[in-house]
Image (cartoon, rainbow, N blue to C red):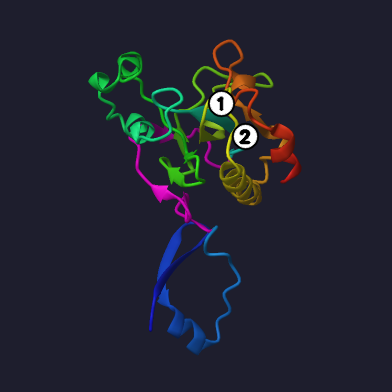
């Protein structure tokens, strides 16, 4: 039996090969295919493209990770409204709350659902629109140099073990891929927009998360 796999060198050249050809050539697979990024996409994530992104001023300056939470309507974890929101396809008539947000152009790089499923909306080298008006240590416009991860949740409800496991695994890889993202440069949305935002909220266990990296 032969399966095709895809791998990338420097995220620029993608090649298709088969396990049979690899074994025949004596090639040793030294990478974790499940964690590998190809063209800025996380292999273990389901990709749903959002139109809400643009180019970074400097794609080599990815140096901040921002943790958010979201659920639509707030507290509802059984719908795909977040996916529709990030795609610009949210119908205002679907819920009264949506009338306030349906026209907003918002996205994140990753969205981690309650059971640990990871959905990617924007390639990492592109600028997702997740932070809004923001400031990190005197530097404004955090979208320019950050990666945004949304957790399905609220400020008050505990996040799931599956979400922590997925977030920790993804963060470890991102820190390897983008070494400027040190533990000291992982923040909540509340830290970079304190007058506007409170997420990921008091329910997020920062000690559990950071001590596992």
Q: Name the residue at the bottom extreme.
A: 24
Q: Is residue 135 above or below residue 195?
A: below
Residues rendered magenta in the picture:
36-60
Viewer-nearest residue: 207 or 180: 207
Q: Which mark is residue 64?
A: 2
- The one nearer the camera, 155 or 46, is 155
Check whether the beta carbons of the residues at disc 2 and disc 1 lie within 8 A of each other. yes
Query: Predominant secondary structure in magenta?
Result: loop
As for residue 191 lying within the magenta part, the answer is no
Badge 1: few (under 14), some or many (20 or more) residues near its Cα, within 10 Å? many
Looking at the image, how many numbered discs can be counted on the residues? 2
**Image point (37%, 32%), residue name:** 86
Mark number displayed over residue 195? none
Image coordinates of residue 54 in percent, x first then y, are: 40, 33
Q: Residue at x 43, y 44 (%)?
A: 119
| Image coords of residue 36 (percent x, y) | 53, 59
Q: Is residue 128 left or right of residue 29?
A: left
Query: For the residue carrying disc 2, how many other residues have a C-alpha within 10 Å: few (<14), some (14-19), or many (20+)?
Result: many
Q: Nearer the N terminus, badge 2 or badge 1? A: 2
Q: Residue at x 38, y 84 (%)?
A: 1
Query: Which mark is on residue 142?
Result: 1
Q: Is residue 169 above or below residue 55?
A: below
Q: Secondary structure at mark 2?
A: strand
The quarter holding residue 105 reads top left
Q: Quadrant of residue 68?
A: top right
- Measuring from the top left, give residue 128's x and y in whole percent: 45, 33
Q: At which x and y percent is residue 63?
A: 63, 37
């Amino acid at each position: 039996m032969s399966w095709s796999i895809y791998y990338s060198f420097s995220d620029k050249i993608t090649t298709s090969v088969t396990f049979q050809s690899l074994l025949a050539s004596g090639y040793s697979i030294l990478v974790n295919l499940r964690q590998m990024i190809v063209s800025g996409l996380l292999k273990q994530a389901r990709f749903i493209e959002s139109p809400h992104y643009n180019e970074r001023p400097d794609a080599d300056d990815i140096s901040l990770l921002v943790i958010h939470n979201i659920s639509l309507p707030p507290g509802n974890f059984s719908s795909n409204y977040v996916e529709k929101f990030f795609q610009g396809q949210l119908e205002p008539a679907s819920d009264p709350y949506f009338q306030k947000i349906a026209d907003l152009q918002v996205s994140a790089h990753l969205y981690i659902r309650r059971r640990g499923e990871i959905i990617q909306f924007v390639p990492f080298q592109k600028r997702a629109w997740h932070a809004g008006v923001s400031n990190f240590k005197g530097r404004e416009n955090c979208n320019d140099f950050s990666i945004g991860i949304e957790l399905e949740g609220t400020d008050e409800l505990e996040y799931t073990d599956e979400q922590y496991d997925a977030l920790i695994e993804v963060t470890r890889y991102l820190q390897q891929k983008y070494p400027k993202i040190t533990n000291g440069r992982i923040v909540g949305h509340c830290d970079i927009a304190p007058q506007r935002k409170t997420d990921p909220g008091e329910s997020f266990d920062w000690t559990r998360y950071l001590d596992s990296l």
